[in-house]
Amino acid sequence: MTVRIAMVAGETSGDLLASHLIRALKKHVPKAQFYGIGGPRMEAEGFHVLWPCERLAVHGYVDALKRYRELSGIRKRLLAQMRRQPPNAFIGVDAPDFNLWLEEKVRAAGVPSIHFVSPSIWAWRGGRIKAIARSVSHMLCLFPFESAIYERAGIPATYVGHPLADEFPMEPDRLAARERLQVDPNAILVALLPGSRQSEVRNLARVYLEAAQLLAARHSNIGFLVPLATRETRLIFEQAQHDANASDLPLRVLFGHSVDAMTAADVVLVASGTASLEAALLKRPMVISYRMGKWQFRLMRRMAYLPWVGLPNILSNDSVVPELLQDAATPLALADAIDAWLGNPAAVADLSRRFFDLHLSLRQNTAEKAAQAILPYLHKGSG
C-alpha cells in the first residue's frame, strides 16, 4: 500500500526544513507520496504542491485579518481533500496559527498529526499548550529544553536538534569569508543586521547607522557590512542612511550573504530572531537590539516569561550577550556595547567556547532524527 503524507510548510524557512525531512523520510519509505502546501525546495524532492507556501505569508495582524477569508478557504479545501482520502500522516511544519487548526481536525478523523518546530510557548502564550494537546500526536522540538515541557503536559515529543547546527561548520573560516566578500583581512568589521522584515528595518536602520557613525569616529580602520534580503528592505535602509547623513560611512550593503557577513565580522549587531542564533553558531560576539511600537512592546513584555528575547541567551540560560531593547537601544549604548567586545579578546574567546558547546548540543542530524520519530506513525494512518 502506498504511503501518503500530507504536509503544510509556511514561508521559505519551512520549505527548507520540510525538504530535508522529505529527503530523510524517502530513504526509509522510497515510494512515499507527499502533497499539500509547500515551496520549490519541497517540490524538488518530489512534493506535489497544491498551493505554494508563499500564499501563507502574512505581514502583521492587519494583513492576517485582511487575508483571513482566503487563508481559511485554502485550509478548508485541504482538510476536505484529506477527509476524502485520508493520508497516513499529516505533518505541519512551523506556521502554528495555520497548522494547529488543521492538525486538530485531521487527528479527530483518525490521522496522526505531527508538528515540526515547537511554538515558543516557553517564551509567551503558554496557554496554547492546551490547544496543542488536542491537536498534535507528536511534537518535534528544535531546542533541548522543549521536549520536557510537552512531556509534562502528556504530549509525546522528541528533541531533534536544529537544522542550522547541522549545516554550519563547527569552526567557521573567517579569512575565507573576508576573501569571498573582498574585504581587508586586517580591518575591524561590524555586521549590521536590522532584520528581514520591512517594519524591523524601519525601526532599527537609523539607530544602527548612528551607532556606526560613533564607531567610525573612534576607529579609523573600521568597516560595516549590511546584508539585506530584499529590494524593499534595501531601499528603506538607504533612505535611513540618507536621513542620517551617513553616506560617507565605510559601509557596504549586500544582497543576502548574511552568513558570510557575520562570519567575516568581529562583532555582529543583530535584531533578535533566527539571525542571532546563526551568529552564535558562527561563534561571533554580538549585541542584540530590537525596537517595535510602544504599545506592542508593553504587551509583549507583559506576556513574556523569560528575562531574554535573544536565542543565544535563552539557550544558554544566561546573559552571555547584551540585549538592548526599545528605549535602551540608543546609538551610544549600541556603540559602547560593540566596543566592549572589540576591546576584550578574552571575553570573545570565552564566548566562542560557550557557543561551540551550544553548537554541539544542537547538532543532532535533525532531518534523520525527525524521520525516525515519524516512521512509527505512518502505519497508523488510513492510507
Image: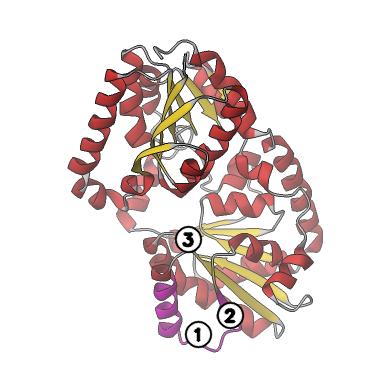
Q: Quick one: label 2, few (<14), some, or many (20+) residues within 10 Å?
A: some
Q: Check if mark 1's residue and mark 2's residue have beta carbons within 8 Å.
A: yes
Which residue has dot 1 on it? 246
Pick whichever of labels 1 and 2 is earlier in the sequence.
1
Residue drawn 66% across and 43% down? Answer: 165
**Is residue 110 part of the magenta span, yes or no?**
no
Q: CA distance from mark 1 to mark 2?
A: 9 Å
Amino acid type shown at disc 1: Ala
Pick whichever of labels 3 and 1 is earlier in the sequence.
3
Pick whichever of labels 3 and 2 is earlier in the sequence.
3
Give the image location of residue 375, x and y in percent.
56, 18
Which residue has dot 2 on it? 251
Give the image location of residue 98, x and y in percent.
33, 35
Residue drawn 76% across and 58% down? Answer: 348
Q: On screen, 275 above or below 116?
A: below
In front: label 1 or label 2: 2
Give the image location of residue 301, x and y in percent.
40, 46
In this rendering, would 12 be left or right of 169?
left
Which residue has dot 3 on it? 195
Callout 2: helix, strand or loop?
A: strand
The image quadrant where one finds the C terminus is top left
Q: CA distance from mark 3 to mark 2?
A: 17 Å
Q: CA distance from mark 3 to mark 1?
A: 19 Å
Q: On screen, 43 above or below 172?
A: above
